[in-house]
Image: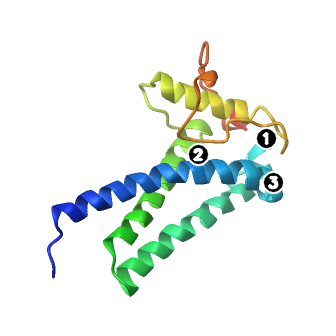
Amino acid sequence: MNSVSAITILVCSLITIGTFLFWEFVAWFTHKYIMHGFLWVWHRSHHTVHDHALERNDWFAVVFSIPSIGLFYYYSLVDYNPNGLAVGLGIFCYGVFYLVFHDIIVHQRIHWRPAKRSKYLQRMIHAHYIHHSKHTKEGCEAFGFLYAPKKYEPSSFTFRKDRQETQ
């Protein structure tokens, strides 16, 4: 078995980080033009107040996991390539970030919030609250998850406690 060189670890780390950051654009684009476009039939459930454990919108998590699963499978079992695995890892890490930030911290699908909240975390959450102030496909803003422009900086910030308040 070959040993992994430091250069391979560095390159794979950079690929993972770059893929993670690129997926913010993928998520923004998909959210704005696909979820609030022709797949509103799935995403509407996420903008509707309800008390269901699952939403039709959750199918997007399944769809977004397919590239990562496919890359892990192909580049580990079919044609080993650490760079391809790094891309799969970057997508996976973005998915974990999305789950923790979006589903847990913002929408309270599991009741947990960090004890310390930076101003930037408050800005990201506030931007998402603004996004969910509309319950229609049109007229929404703030489609990203990692990046929230300064215009979303809240003058005062209060977490919404119940999941229904965040829809």
From where the camera sits, is residue 110 visible?
Answer: no
Rounded to the nearest angstrom, the CA distance separating label 3 from label 1 is 20 Å
| CB-based contact (under 8 Å), mark 3 and mark 2 | no
Q: Residues within 10 Å of mark 1 (few under 14, many from 20)?
A: few
Percent position (x, y) of residue 135? Answer: 82, 39
Residue under the image location 55 percent in, 48 percent down: 24
Label 3 or label 2, whichever lies nearer to me, is 3
**Pointer 3 or 1: first along the chain:** 3
- In-front residue for pair 62/162: 62
Label 3 or label 1, whichever lies nearer to me, is 3
Q: Residue furthest bottom?
A: 78
Three-letter amino acid code at disc 3? Gly
**Pointer 2 or 1: first along the chain:** 1
Three-letter amino acid code at disc 2? Asp
Quarter of the figure with residue 41: bottom right
**Pointer 3 or 2: first along the chain:** 3
Q: Residues within 10 Å of mark 3 (few under 14, many from 20)?
A: some
Three-letter amino acid code at disc 1? Val
Percent position (x, y) of residue 153? Answer: 59, 20
Q: How is the image coloured?
A: rainbow
Would you name the residue on which mark 3 appears? 37
Rounded to the nearest angstrom, the CA distance separating label 2 from label 1 is 15 Å
Question: Horizontal placement of 161 versus 39: left or right?
Answer: left
Question: Horizontal placement of 76 versus 43: left or right?
Answer: left
Would you name the residue on which mark 1 appears? 49
Secondary structure under tag 1 reads loop
Question: Horizontal placement of 66 versus 46: left or right?
Answer: left
Rounded to the nearest angstrom, the CA distance separating label 3 from label 2 is 21 Å
Q: Which image quarter holds the C terminus?
A: top right
Rendered view: 152 above or below 44: above
Q: Which mark is residue 163?
A: none
